[in-house]
Amino acid sequence: MSVDWDTLYAERLQGMTTSVIRDILKVAQAPDIISMAGGWPEAALFPVEQFREVAEYVLSEQPEASLQYGLTDGYRPLREKIAAMYRQRGVPISVDNVAITSGSQQALDLAARVFIDKGDPVLVEEPSFIGALQSFTGFQCRYLTVPLDEEGVNLEGFCRACAQKPKFAYLLPTFQNPTGVTMSLARRQQIVDLAAEAGVCILEDDPYGQLRFEGDHLPSLLALNAQQYPENGALGSYIRGDVIHLGTFSKTLAPGLRLAWAISTPEIIGKLVMAKQGADLHTNALAQTMACEFMRRGWLPAQIARIRETYRVRAAAMQEAIAEFFPAGVQTTHPQGGLFLWVTLPEGMNAVELLPEAAAHKVAFVPGAPFFANGGGENCLRLAYATMEPEVIREGIRRLGEVIKAHMG
């Protein structure tokens, strides 16, 4: 008798789905498709020669640290570099506040493992990052969704959701995925204060914070929260905070390294590390030593500057093309950094229904509905500009404009 696999799957599998973006990208990889779907960094900006140099160095000078089993919480010199980087931004942390993870996606999964029981409420923005929703849904949570406005997550909705005592509030305050919206400084302070008053932890995801190409830098929720506790500065350690902060090298160095980090109190970091031990023991040691050496040589600021300038030009090209080719009645966000902008079509339109015609016009995008945890967003879509030259962006927007006009007709 053969195995009846359907009787063996865990209950949590029923709520899991594959990534819509990944499914679309399978089609969008055709060479004649102009893909504005994937939120990928520009591969031409990967520091390949510098990676080659540091790889040769660490394999020669640090072979054991690069190739042997390592600590679950990460390569200590790299954690020290990250802690120093945040201290320069006014966040009083030490190495004990930092854990290295295998990409931010693992950090999201670890947070879900540590905090979510079946049926627990989790506060998320509406819309929110698909990868986070996939992780949290796998642990069978229920969602408290709060809409966004031009200043970030809506205050009234945030207060109502906090009153229901979510396990945490998952927020992307800077160049939010998928909308590109950035939470204002005033709104950041209000959100940090409201969360602290309600006793709600904030899980701050900040993969794009260093990719600002317009406007002034804003402090992270982590930094604002740390300022509430004067003893943090005296001790040089974030010891009483209400924020778990996630950062990554995927958007500044290369996503293939699978290097990210979580910052919080030593107690919470310890819980995440305990969960990580059962997942992968430790993050890629060679990648960690390479990233550490890259930072030690002082190369990271110039690398980030190259990325910012490239994305600034491409974001401007997309916004100019939209102004020229999209019909009246279509609204878009205007990001000051990051990789995306958000398109809202007139009510009654469905972005999914545009996909076949868009494919016929050799252009791809991501429909908005999968970014909504509790449904909605059918008339929205996300466009990414990071991986295309301005002239390609212009042609892609022209084609997409024709598709939208035909459906509005």
Image: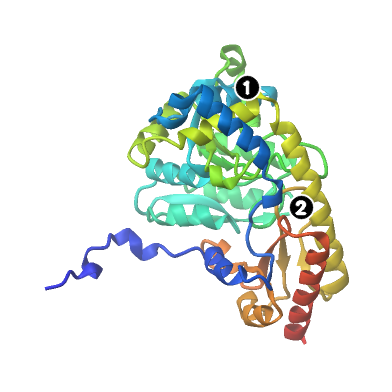
Answer whether residue 186 is visible to the viewer in this image: yes
Is 306 positioned to the left or the right of 276 in the image? right
Tell me which corner region of the image, top left, top right, bottom left or bottom right, holds residue 372. bottom right
Name which residue lies at 60% across and 53% down. 157
| Numbered tag placed on residue 196 in the rendering | none
The residue closer to the viewer here, 330 or 193, is: 330
- Circle on res. 84: 1
Q: How far apart are marks 2 and 1 (CA)?
A: 29 Å
Label 2: which residue?
335
| Labels 2 and 1: the sequence-earlier one | 1
Q: Which of these two is toward me, 58 or 302? A: 58
Query: Residue 301's image quarter?
Result: top right
Q: Check whether the beta carbons of the residues at disc 2 and disc 1 lie within 8 A of each other.
A: no
The residue shown at (32%, 39%) is 278
Q: Which amino acid does label 2 sit on?
A: Pro
Can residue 227 be seen here? Answer: no
Closer to the eye: label 2 or 1: 1
- Who's the residue at 56% across and 50% down the image? 160
Side (left or right) of 157 relative to 141: right
Secondary structure under tag 2 reads loop
- The x, y position of residue 265, in whole percent, is 49, 26
Identify which residue, 265 or 38, lies in the foreground. 38
Classify the position of the N terminus by image quarter. bottom left
Query: Residue 4: x percent and y percent?
Result: 19, 70
